[in-house]
Amino acid sequence: MNKHLHDTGALCPTCLKEYPAEVFADEDGVVWMSRTCPEHGPLTTRMWPDADHYEWLRSEAFPKTRPANPEPMRDACPFGCGTCARHERRGTLLEIEVTRNCNLRCPVCFASAVGGEDDPSLDEISAMYDVIADQVGTDGAVQITGGEPTCRKDLVDIIYLGRQKGFWGIEVNTNGLVITNKEGYLEDLVAAGLTGVYLSFDGLTGNVYEATCGRDILDVKLRAIERCREVGIQVVLSVAVVAGLNDSQLGDLLRFALENSDVVAGLALQPAFTSGRFDAERAMPMSAGDVIFNLAAQSDGLLGVRDIWPLGCSNPLCDTGVFLVKDDAAEHPSGFYPATQRMTMAEYAEGYSPDSPQGSVFLDILDKKGVEVKTGLSVIIMNYMDAVSMDTQRLRECSMMVTVPDGRAIPFCAYHLTDAAGKRVYPPWCKEELRGVGDRQ
């Protein structure tokens, strides 16, 4: 017998209209979300592998800090994002998409970079920096992304521009090809003010990259990490977790990150799935819950499922994580322990700062307590949503935004949202924004 958990809103993947949805647990404790579009029929989506864990995370939600300067509500959710007045949490990680071009054609990339679009000008990028300053101030985290940002010949100027505007943290999201192969390039980026590299790093065997990138580039990834070590800049390993491909390597990736924690500051795990490919009545995307359970099972006892806590900045089902502290006296053979095993949730809530970016929530708390964090490791699990898994309540709590030149900050999952046919709601930089998709005009 099914157990009702809560109500929310969900989308029809064909027309992207929002409809009332029920979230429930089946007899096996698996969490599902169901809704019915009068035109396109019912759809039930698998949301989480364990109802008790799902409900525990939801119970640990942090108080919401609303955006400072919301836009008027111009259309139904998920159209008309701005960030609109309906949004419930402020951005803590804001992206600037500087290109849709890429030097790879990765099948699992949500950006689907194929080239052909005009890149934003430096003046438009300047306006996007101003959006971030307006939304969260210059102490917010900025990620330069794409496409592949290193395809821009003026990436050094883009980074320097952000520094001139007073931003302290600027990270580049990259596949590592250019920083590995172009002599002196990474040094130039660091000299311009780059503070971190967000490196796509999907596994430790060549077959993983053959599937995710179209060819084996593991050697490039390893060399990119060495280049970051050589120039003294931290790197976060970003893993697109694909069921049946690299979900069995989560423990190996964790151990690799710990062994290289002098340069690897974080491990970001993101379950990947493709919008538009699903059964007519049931969708089975991989969730962050699956990643959490798999990671704990593969961690050689270092992590338990409930050692991984909500990061507080967004809905607790969207962003979870833990900080692993390096300590020679740690009981685990790795020499690390989870910070969550040595604090209570009440202490966590008391020390939490709504200004902390996603990756530094625990780090900031521990630093204030005098705990050594320079050689520790942040582990983050991000639960992105597409048309089949979009919970509109979670969307309204998104703290990860993509900026556009006209002054708006659009929730990440809305910005990259497509219908079942692959048509975007928000074209790149919203220069020619659609009124909707499907039959909407």
Image (cartoon, rainbow, N blue to C red):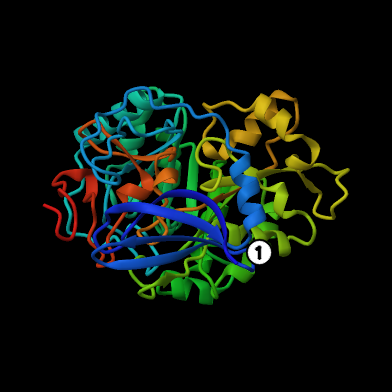
Relative to the observer, which residue lies in front, 309 or 266? 309
Relative to the observer, which residue lies in front, 139 or 437? 437
Q: Which residue is mark 1?
A: 294
Image location of residue 390, percent across then percent down: 40, 54
Image location of residue 317, percent across then percent down: 54, 48
Quick one: which residue is furthest to the left in this view? 441
Q: Is residue 339 left or right of residue 144?
A: right
Q: Residue at x 65, y 47 (%)?
A: 56
Q: Quadrant of residue 93?
A: top left
* Residue 76 in view: yes
Quick one: which residue is furthest to the front in this view? 1
Number of numbered tags placed on the structure image? 1
Q: Residue at x 65, y 35 (%)?
A: 362
Q: Is residue 413 left or right of residue 336?
A: left
**Amino acid of disc 1:** Asn
Q: Residue at x 25, y 35 (%)?
A: 125
Relative to the observer, which residue lies in front, 244 or 18? 18
Q: Quadrant of residue 68?
A: top left
Residue 37 lies, with reference to residue 196, above or below; the image says below
Question: Badge 1 local density, few (<14 within 10 Å), some, or many (20+)?
Answer: some
Q: Quadrant of residue 43?
A: bottom left
Q: Residue at x 31, y 34 (%)?
A: 83
Image location of residue 381, percent across then percent down: 56, 51
Q: Is residue 148 left or right of residue 377?
A: left
Image quarter where the N terminus lies is bottom right
Image location of residue 384, percent across then percent down: 45, 53
Label 1, secondary structure: give it. Answer: helix
Relative to the observer, which residue lies in front, 414 or 45? 45
Residue 363 lies, with reference to residue 439, above or below; the image says above
* Residue 265 in view: no
